[in-house]
Image (cartoon, helix red, strand yellow):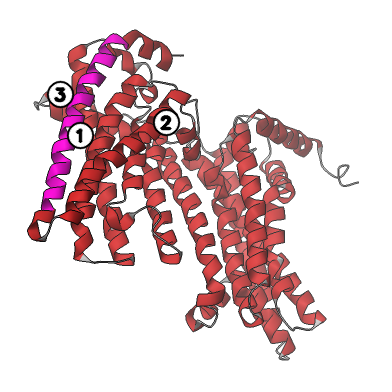
């Protein structure tokens, strides 16, 4: 019966949405997101229902915040096709704005996002302890109103993200946002497990989660049993008003997206001016740095060590320092080598101009050595500082951390140069939001290189660590010096090998990146 009430244009748009999703290539990402969503909901229910009764309302409100935030930022983690129909798909077709709005509203109501919101926010009426059936029903009604507001906000987020992802800068920002969101979500669940024991009676937390709209359902349940019926009425009116504002925002966003023209690529005259007189090494470093920052897939790889830093800090605060942040963050540093494992693969056909001229290849490899060392050392330094702030700031461990940062950074630089020549491959066309897929698109040879780099880097760190632990007084500072000397030798050998590989395998690399 409901299908008969849908007009033919809307039904056509719904069919188009199904075809777009069916043709999307991110099936693996969709499955991962569904599994993560189910596991997250199960974890939230288990944590909340197993907590003390006095802490359940606070935990339920906190879980509601996490659910809504994940719903709003979920488009960052999916590909363009996975987001379904957007106004850009029908901008040049004779489609009425009202029909498009109805179709988008039905798509949103039928999506898995709605199920995730309903199940997640249903935790509040289920978890609130010792309340009357009437109060529980009122809480459920308020939770449903909150679902409607959150769903409308998520649809606005889809429109805004789609518009942003059609510009180079927007693709880069969405890539960074996707990786940060995934790490933040994981960190939030790690912290959530400690809320019931550490912050159950924290007045600030209890107040903060109730002030937000996601906590109004818990406030309403407490007010009904106290006889303050005006509180749920006021909350319902406020949510209805907020929902009306968001729907109006979404309506105008659909109209603006349907009527706008696609963005045109602009050329920066400052970048097309004559070549500045500067050294070839500086020129190569500048060119490689720009390639690293303007390609969304490379940016996704670049943000991965930062994600591990965030997760490492949370794990250190909640359990143990499994990444060794206090001692130079060797695992985080060595993981940056995966960023350079596909350097030529991401260059596309431009790799031929590099690999066909040995002199140019040497400059590019030198530039990548410098960039890899600087990036790895920066992540190591930041990780060490964070680890010492959260953990043990003893000065005794500082020489160990310095030796590890130096050795691991040079190992990463050496590996970055060799990997890009020894394991060239193509990363399939991906969207800005699938940064994790970029990391997973490596060939078996490149994955083997990454594991070998981590093992070799650990061995390279070992002499400096032993010296720092064995020598007394100021002699402990010989540790980073020894690491620098050993690492310098490794870098020299790796550079020589990389140049030989690029020179001999130029046609093979070109064929691989042009496939």
Q: Which mark is residue 448?
A: none
Rendered residue at 41%/26% (across/down)? 446
Near mark 3 (Cα within 10 A), the count class, few <14, some 14-19 or many ≥20, is: few
Of the residues tagged 2 and 3, which is closer to the observer? Answer: 3
Q: Is residue 357 magenta?
A: no
Q: Which mark is residue 264?
A: 2
Determine the secondary structure under disc 3. Answer: loop
Near mark 1 (Cα within 10 A), the count class, few <14, some 14-19 or many ≥20, is: some
Residue range in magenta is 477-505
Q: Are marks 2 and 1 in contact (CB under 8 Å)?
A: no
**Sequence order check, earlier mark of 2 and 3:** 2
Q: Is residue 298 visible?
A: yes
**Sequence order check, earlier mark of 3 and 1:** 3
In screen coordinates, is 509 left or right of 257?
left
Determine the secondary structure under disc 1. Answer: helix
Determine the secondary structure under disc 2. Answer: loop
Of the residues tagged 3 and 1, which is closer to the observer? Answer: 1
Q: Is residue 478 magenta?
A: yes
Residue placed farthest to the bottom in the image? 227
**Sequence order check, earlier mark of 2 and 1:** 2
Number of numbered markers? 3
Report the residue marked by disc 3: 275
Where in the figure is residue 169, as x and y percent of width and height? Answer: 39, 39
Q: Is residue 58 above or below residue 321?
A: below
Q: Is residue 83 above or below residue 71?
A: above
Identify the image quadrant of residue 512: top left
Report the residue marked by disc 1: 370
Rendered residue at 28%/55% (across/down)? 327
Identify the image quadrant of residue 192: bottom right
């Amino acid at each position: 019966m409901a299908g008969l009430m849908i007009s033919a244009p809307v039904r056509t748009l719904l069919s188009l949405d199904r075809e777009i999703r069916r043709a999307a290539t991110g099936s693996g990402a969709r499955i991962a997101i569904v599994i993560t969503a189910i596991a997250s909901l199960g974890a939230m229910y288990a944590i909340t229902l197993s907590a003390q009764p006095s802490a359940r309302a606070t935990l339920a409100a906190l879980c509601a915040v996490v659910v809504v935030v994940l719903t709003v930022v979920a488009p960052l983690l999916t590909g363009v096709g996975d987001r379904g129909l957007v106004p850009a798909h029908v901008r040049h077709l004779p489609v009425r704005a009202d029909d498009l709005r109805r179709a988008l509203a039905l798509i949103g109501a039928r999506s898995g996002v709605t199920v995730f919101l309903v199940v997640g926010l249903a935790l509040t009426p289920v978890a609130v302890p010792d309340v009357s059936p009437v109060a529980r029903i009122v809480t459920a009604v308020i939770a449903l109103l909150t679902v409607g507001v959150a769903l409308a906000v998520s649809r606005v987020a889809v429109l805004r993200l789609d518009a942003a992802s059609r510009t180079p800068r927007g693709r880069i920002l969405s890539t960074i946002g996707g990786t940060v969101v995934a790490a933040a979500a994981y960190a939030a669940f790690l912290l959530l497990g400690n809320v019931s024991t550490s912050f159950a009676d924290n007045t600030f937390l209890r107040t903060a989660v109730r002030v937000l709209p996601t906590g109004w359902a818990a406030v309403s349940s407490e007010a009904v049993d106290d006889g303050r019926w005006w509180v749920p009425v006021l909350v319902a009116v406020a949510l209805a008003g907020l929902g009306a504002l968001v729907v109006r925002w979404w309506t105008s966003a659909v109209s603006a997206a349907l009527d706008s023209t696609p963005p045109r690529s602009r050329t920066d005259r400052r970048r097309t001016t004559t070549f500045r007189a500067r050294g070839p090494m500086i020129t190569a470093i500048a060119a490689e740095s720009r390639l690293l920052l303007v390609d969304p897939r490379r940016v996704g790889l670049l943000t991965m060590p930062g994600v591990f830093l965030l997760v490492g800090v949370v794990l250190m605060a909640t359990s143990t320092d499994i990444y060794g942040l206090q001692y130079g963050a060797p695992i985080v540093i060595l993981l940056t080598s995966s960023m350079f494992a596909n350097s030529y693969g991401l260059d596309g056909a431009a790799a031929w101009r590099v690999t066909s001229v040995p002199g140019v290849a040497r400059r590019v490899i030198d530039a990548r050595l410098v960039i890899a060392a600087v990036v790895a050392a920066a992540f190591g330094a930041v990780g060490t500082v964070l680890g010492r702030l959260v953990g043990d700031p003893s000065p005794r461990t500082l020489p160990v951390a310095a030796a590890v940062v130096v050795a691991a950074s040079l190992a990463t630089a050496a590996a970055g140069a060799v990997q890009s020549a020894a394991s060239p491959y193509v990363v399939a066309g991906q969207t800005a939001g699938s940064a994790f897929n970029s990391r997973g698109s490596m060939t078996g040879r490149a994955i083997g290189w990454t594991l070998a780099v981590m093992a070799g880097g650990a061995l390279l760190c070992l002499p400096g660590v032993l010296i720092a632990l064995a020598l007394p007084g100021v002699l402990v500072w010989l540790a980073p010096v020894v690491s620098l000397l050993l690492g310098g030798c490794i870098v020299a050998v790796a550079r020589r090998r990389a140049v030989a590989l690029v020179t001999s395998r130029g046609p093979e690399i070109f064929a691989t990146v042009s496939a």
